[in-house]
Image: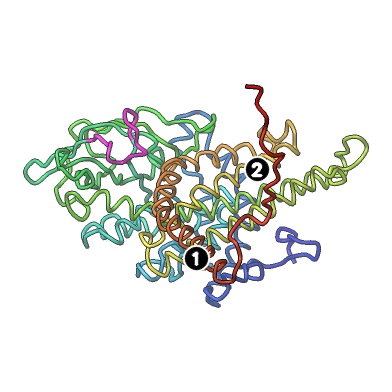
Amino acid sequence: MSELLVNSEKGHLSASQRIPQIARPFVSERAAKTLDLVEKFVEEECIPHDEVYIRQIGETTQQRFTSHPSVIEDLKKKAKALGLWNMFLPKNHFKEGAGFSNLEYGLMAEYLGKSRTASEATNCAAPDTGNMEVLAKYGTDAQKKRWLEPLLEGKIRSAFLMTEPQVASSDATNIEMTITRDGDSYVLNGSKWWSSGIGDPRCEIFIVLGKTDPNNANKYAQQSVVLVPHNTPGITIHRMLGVFGYDDAPHGHGHVSFTNVRVPASNLVLGEGDGFKIIQGRLGPGRIHHAMRSIGAAEKALEWFLARINDPRKKPFGEMLHKHGIMLDRVARSRIEIDAARLAVLNAAITIDASDAKGALKEIAEVKVLVPQMNLDVIDRAIQAYGGAGVSQDTPLAAMYANGRTMRIVDGPDEVHLLQLGKNENKRGKAHKSRIEAQRKKGHELCQKYGIEPKDPLYLGRSTGEGKSKL
């Protein structure tokens, strides 16, 4: 057994053996075998190669956003040879993928989340995954031929442009970029930011949300989605945005403006006014992908935590860290929270498989709020165990925390999901009030039937009698 796979006191317990019992009936034999291959590929290849990737990117800003680490292409070849490619496209909706369900890919995505290179090496990296789903589901044959095919082959990358610096983009109806029809073209004007992937020199296509009909009385029918090639005249990438000081190069998150950017009308996705429908369909499965990768990141943080408290060199107050009860308490809480969050995500994936993302809105929203916070809590405990090393570049924990914190914002901030969950849950309030009142009324009637006075069984009724007045 490779020492790179050891994960228990007995050696190695494979990924397929660790599938939660509640999910096993939904996992095919082929998927279970692939899951083991994913685990082996990530642990033995991707995580060690992460060190190479980080150093191949370069040092200056210009170097970091014009580089393409060769290690990625080497890993891609290995992944393809193992059949680990495009696992994310669910089989019940797309023919272009590897033939797995959302649940099966969710289990695989957990392992991809433990490595910086694994998702891209298997062609399962955001934002390409969501963009490929959009093209596969809504694209014309010509759009699929021009953009989907090279994306599926891993030859190019893409970006998704929705949020804008001047508006509250958590409400997508606020988007202001204009998409104006002009003969057989559309002309785009406006600015975007947090455009993930736009810094990569291999990013050749932008999927852009803007307004084609800003005066439409239905605010959900004002938006459209247009495909914009990266080299179209009028595009300016102003800067890349750091995340807690990390630049995420060469992928990055860009601030970009469009000035009279003209594209053919055939670059419209689906139809005018369908933008909101498209982005909602895109973000649902993406939230599951983020959640499962976050589970993997939390598992990795716990592994680093356990390694630290079992380091014989670290003996505060004369004892190893695992001898201090507070550390074991934190380990136990981390284990409970990770396992509980995983079950919630798998339930959401199963619900999507049984219907679609729209049929799993509640479950998706729940994990979108639950998992990022759990991930941060676990990483924070690991950082605390490492002390100064935990917040430095000597461990991956600080970078993991920065990435994990953004998950509470991307694809809709916590507040949006909590508000919608609360509103939907509150719709049941009147029904619950009526039912509770009816049950109490029937209880009183049954007391009378059995000759029992319906009063509080703890009622005493003690009194000192009537008080005397001096008046």
Residue in view at x 70 percent, y 42 percent? 463
Residue in view at x 35 percent, y 67 percent? 94
Q: Residue furthest front?
A: 471
Mark 1: few/some/many CA within 10 Å (<14, 14-19, 20+)? few
Work out whether 278 lies above or below 233: below
What is the image's colouring? rainbow
Could you say where residue 335 lies in the image, as x and y percent from the top left? 69, 54
Q: Quadrant of the C terminus?
A: top right
Q: Foreground: 107 or 238?
A: 107
Magenta stretch encompasses residue 436: no
Q: Tell me how far mark 1 sits from mark 2, CA to CA.
A: 51 Å
Q: Residue furthest top?
A: 471
Could you say where residue 201 lies in the image, as x and y percent from the top left? 39, 41
Residue on which the image places disc 2: 379
* Segment tinted magenta in the rendering: 164-177
Q: Which mark is residue 442?
A: 1
Magenta stretch encompasses residue 168: yes
- Amino acid at circle 1: Lys
Position of residue 144 in the picture relative to residue 439 (left or right): left
- Amino acid at circle 2: Ile
Position of residue 308 in the picture relative to residue 62 (left or right): right
| Residue 80 seen from this side | no
Work out whether 66 lies above or below 129: above
